[in-house]
Amino acid sequence: MAKTKDRETGRISIHTENIFPIIKKWLYSEKEIFLRELVSNAVDAIKKLSHINLVDGLQLSENYAIDITLDKDAGTLTISDNGVGMNADEIRRYINQIAFSSVEEYVEKYSKLAEDNQIIGHFGLGFYSAFMVAKKVEIRSLSYLPESVGAYWSCDGSTKYQLSKIDKAERGTEIVLFLEDDEKDFLEPVKVREVLERYCKFLPVPIRLAGEQINDCTPLWNQPSTEIDAATYKEFYRKLYPFCEDPLFWIHFNVDFPFNLKGILYFPRLNNEFDVSRSHIKLYCNQVFVSDSCAELIPEFLTPLQGCIDAPDLPLNVSRSYLQNDPQVRKIREVITSRVATKIVELAKSEMSVFGPIWDDIHPFVKFGMMRDDKFSDKVKDHIVYRTTATERYTTLPAYLERAAESHQDKVYYATDETAQASYLRLFSGQGIEVLLLDAMIDNHFIQFLEMKNSGVSFLRVDSELAETLVGKQPADDIATSPSGATRSEQALKVFRDCLPTDLDIKGETLNDASIPALLMQSEQKRRLSEMTRMMGNKEGLPAEHQLLVNHANPIVRKIAELNESGRRSDAEMLVAHVYDLAQLAAGGFDKERMEQFLVRSYHLLELVNPE
Ligand code: ADP
Ligand code: MG
């Protein structure tokens, strides 16, 4: 260290001489974090002073603020604060020794991770990060201590520095960055504002760019939830996500023990079940923005959540994979999951007119969560509801089973598509049998999960099996009319069997509802198996094995027998073909060829309606 009377030059005690280029290279993509680091230091300096002020009863000015000024002519960006300031000795200690050696340590520890972009917040770089964008950095500082002398420090990005006295009237520190030629972007107010808004928007000290404050010093998550109304929560959401629709609900938490965790999580309205286009939860550390994704802190099934989390105790300069396995992070995930469960239970207790529409939006992720997380499942399972054909529109599973107890014990009838299964639904509802509407993609899996969790309960799609109460007694007039001694029902069945493909299983049944001539049925187990093989990539799935259920109570079916009896076989066959097509149509549709045949036959049938 060479020292003349008031000018000192020296070497920063750093072992890796070429540390600067390394840092510049690594953090290329996130150079802008230098602003976060320098503004954070300014905030720290102000917090220190305000603490001293409080404890020592100094009568110092309390107009704390941080100013960022841009000077295009000089090519400088300056960050000024009116915090504690530093005298020459402190600069030696905190900047030359600490700031530089901590960066050296950082380089040794994290260089590999930083290269792979694995470090969460690049925390730990601190003051040194100024050299990512500056060819020269100056410090002008005046300590708050009485009789302090202004200190000037400068360093041109090598390991040499200069330290001398200056005249400085105002307490505090100015950090002047002489920007690198290709970093002149940071002289543009628009650019600097954007970066400040990202990282510094919620810092607790006023931050001004060209005199105008850009931050909100008391972010909503730091305020007591009892004092915040819904409109304020929504307004804050719009601040975080300016282009999003209002959220459905939110959870505000404030945990002090065993760790600090604050935040507001919002549940957004999703466009579809697998809407992953959302922006994610923002992670803060003591009100400083760290990252736009904190997947490690959130269980996968809660990915749709938005909002912010302030987790000051987390080690944010470590790798993501480390964080994933950190016990504290696991605990945070549990706290979040548990709070979400509590909120859902609370919402479920409100009027169905309120909860119903919310449920329609959130049920896929709740179901996904239940299948993923037993604790979550246990908490919410008694409160989740299902859409039902009953007048209440929503029901819990126990309530459904209770109502079903007499007629169809432990069987839950459900539909997956109200349009495609309309005639089955009409049949069930017409006879007073309640059907659950499980039409989300996830319901397929969720049904199996429910069966596993509720032993003895089985779920049957409306086209898989008829409830016993839908089937009545054989018609009294079903007597033998033909020379062969076959009853009318038997004759009708025979025509069906003769005309239709031989591999089709045809069964006669007398339904209480006479309006439907025939229905296609498919066993629940076979259908599930077939859906599963299709899901696993087999396009065709297993061959559909349908059964055609012919309703003897239906007048058309009876007419088929009569036509056959009176020798009008071709008319009988035409009706059979049409009834079969209608059953297929009711079960979901045709292929092209059958559609054509169906239309041609339909036109022909219409021609048969004769004018009087
Ligand atoms: P850290 O903030 O983690 O301590 P930094 O490298 O950011 O590390 O800063 C090193 C030290 O330099 C700080 O701890 C502080 O003592 C001092 N310092 C930096 N900026 C300022 C400032 N604006 N005012 C006062 N002291 C500062
Ligand atoms: Mg710092």
Image (cartoon, helix red, strand yellow):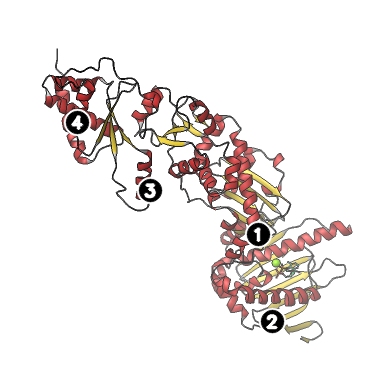
Instruction: Give the residue type at disc 2.
Output: Ile
Q: Which residue is mark 1?
A: 327
Q: Which residue is mark 4?
A: 577
Q: Is residue 433 visible?
A: yes
Query: Vertical placement of 51 versus 233: above or below?
Result: below
Rounded to the nearest angstrom, the CA distance separating label 2 from label 3 is 63 Å
Rounded to the nearest angstrom, the CA distance separating label 4 from label 3 is 31 Å
Residue in the image at 69% along x and 62% along y: 40
The quarter of the rendering in which ligand 1 is drawn is: bottom right
On screen, residue 204 versus residue 358, left or right, reads right
Residue in the image at 85% along x and 67% along y: 145
Q: Position of residue 85 (x, y in %)?
A: 78, 67
Instruction: Give the residue type at disc 3.
Output: Met
Question: Does label 1 or label 3 sit earlier along the sequence?
Answer: 1
Question: Does label 2 or label 1 sit earlier along the sequence?
Answer: 2
Q: Position of residue 221 (x, y in %)?
A: 67, 48
Q: Which residue is mark 3?
A: 532
On screen, residue 348 versus residue 225, left or right, reads left
Q: Position of residue 224 (x, y in %)?
A: 72, 44
| Number of numbered discs overlaid on the protein picture | 4
- Mark 1, mark 3: which one is toward the viewer? 3
Q: Which residue is mark 2?
A: 14
